[in-house]
Image (cartoon, rainbow, N blue to C red):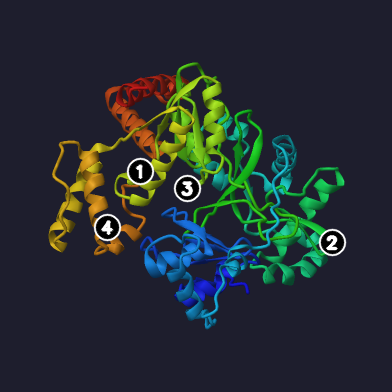
Amino acid sequence: MEIRIEQIVDILGLERERRSQKADSFNVRCPFCNDHKYHLNINTAKGVFNCPRCSTGGGKLDLYSLVRFGRKYIKGDREVFHRLLEEIGEDNRNFEYKKERNVVENKYEAILPPSDNVLHEAYGAVLRFKPFALSEEHRQNLLDRGLREEDIERNEYRTIPAEMPWIKGYKKALKVAEIMRKPLQNRGFNPSIYHIAAGVLLADHLAGQGYNLKGVPGFYKLCGHWGFNLSSGMLIPTRNMNGEVVGLQVRVDKGNVRYLTVSSKGLPEGATENISRTHFPLGNPVLRNKGAILLTEGPLKADVARLLMGGASPFMALQGVNNTRDLSSEFQSLKEMGVSQVVEMFDMDKVINPNVSKASKKIEDLAHEAEVDFTRRYWALDECERRYADLLKLAAFNGIQVPEETGNVVVDTVGAAQALYASGKVKDYFSGKALWDPSSKGIDDYLLKQMKAKEEQEAKLVVLPNKETLTENKEESTVEHSSGLLQAVKRKFAF
């Protein structure tokens, strides 16, 4: 007898998101974190579940037990297991616990990515693919974030276009794409015929040059042909400590989900594990003995923040606050290199988002296990004060008691948010994304805002005699400003 996790999902009445249905997984609304957008992933191949929003996860019996009894499953728990058998219509009067093994175990074959140098070679070829040249729209987006032209070129950002009219000239690739389309749809993937064909062209080009594509996230083999799973948007490289490209992320131009990790999970020859990697920006200073490294969320955010802080402090970034699989080994490597402290600089909405607070605590535990110090940094405290006032009003209106004030606005805001969240009375407040002013939410946003404010102030104080002087002094002024901003930030965050 085998009970599959899909059966348990249906027994519990969890609502599935149809567009997330793939060969080995689908998403449902998480019953543990006031979820309205189908964050909880059901992995049917492994028989496990995980919610990246609240970090709740486990096996199929854990899912059933948590929803029905409010506790994780412990082997031999007759109450949980008998109730489950009753709900699926199995006779448990003569139940023997040896059957439990068949319920828990799933046949699953993991496909791991190849070595970092193999990933770097394959992804380097992807980044050199001419049709993926950076669009002017994306270039301007990067400039608006505070990056310079030389940073953009060095970091190798690219664009996967939404429209690919040039593919019409490749009849063979289009025929292969037509053959692949239905099998892809059956596995839950629904790219355009042009994107499939472009992926086939790219993969065929790399395979013809001798690149190893098996297990490289994004690549897959279907109907006898290699392909590459494309999503349109800005392509952002993820790099290891040595600067090698070990992953790719797409910043989607439209939609609720802004960042997607390039993956072919659920497709033949596609990697199933270790797909999301920790990012280390190019230009990081040499990691020094007894030094600190700043940890944030998102490769692009880390690239921008490192530059806006003057480049003196090294950064690292997770693909998402809950993508911590390789952090233990990364922390250990950092310790061996002499780094003594990790400084968490997640977005400021962490003070009112209990799920991010939970993720931060997990990372703190991982740092301590590696015997590395851990601390958190906060900014935009004026916005924090406004949010705290809002939370107090919300608590008073709903009759919710919050902790007494400590005089520390961050501690008080965190305490009030956790009390409101735990009450379950204000679900809509925590389900929205507008929990913080976008101009100061991330460390990159905040530094850019500070830089612009300083530039505006300087512009009011300096009288320029003519246009030529403005043009000649522009680069020098930027350098002077960056230095001044760095010193101000160092004083504020005590780096």
Residue 288, numbered label: none
Determine whether, in the image, residue 57 is placed left or right of residue 484: right
Q: Vertical placement of 470 versus 8: above or below? A: above
- Of badges 2 and 4, nearer the viewer stands 4
Q: In the rendered image, which residue does mark 2 sit on?
A: 224
| Circle 2 residues within 10 Å: few <14, some 14–19, many ≥20 | few
Q: What's the distance in space between the residues labelled 3 and 4, CA to CA? A: 20 Å
Dividing the image into 4 quarters, which one contains the N terminus?
A: bottom right
The tag earlier along the polypeptide, 1 or 4, is: 4
Q: In the rendered image, which residue does mark 3 sit on?
A: 322
The tag earlier along the polypeptide, 1 or 2, is: 2
Q: In the rendered image, which residue does mark 4 sit on?
A: 422
Q: In the rendered image, which residue does mark 1 sit on?
A: 441
| Circle 3 residues within 10 Å: few <14, some 14–19, many ≥20 | many
Q: Vertical placement of 183 versus 33: above or below? A: below
The tag earlier along the polypeptide, 3 or 4, is: 3
Q: What's the distance in space between the residues labelled 1 and 2, CA to CA? A: 47 Å
- Name the amino acid type tagged 3: Asn
Residue 468, visible in the rendered structure: no
Could you say which quadrant of the image residue 266 lies in?
bottom right
The tag earlier along the polypeptide, 3 or 1, is: 3
Q: Vertical placement of 491 versus 329: above or below? A: above
- Name the amino acid type tagged 2: Gly
Q: What's the distance in space between the residues labelled 2 and 4, CA to CA? A: 52 Å
Query: Percent x, y for residue 62?
Result: 48, 62
The tag earlier along the polypeptide, 2 or 4, is: 2
**What residue is rendered at 56% in x and 25% in y?**
283
Could you say which quadrant of the image residue 46 lies in?
bottom right
| Circle 1 residues within 10 Å: few <14, some 14–19, many ≥20 | many
- Name the amino acid type tagged 1: Lys
- Of badges 1 and 2, nearer the viewer stands 2
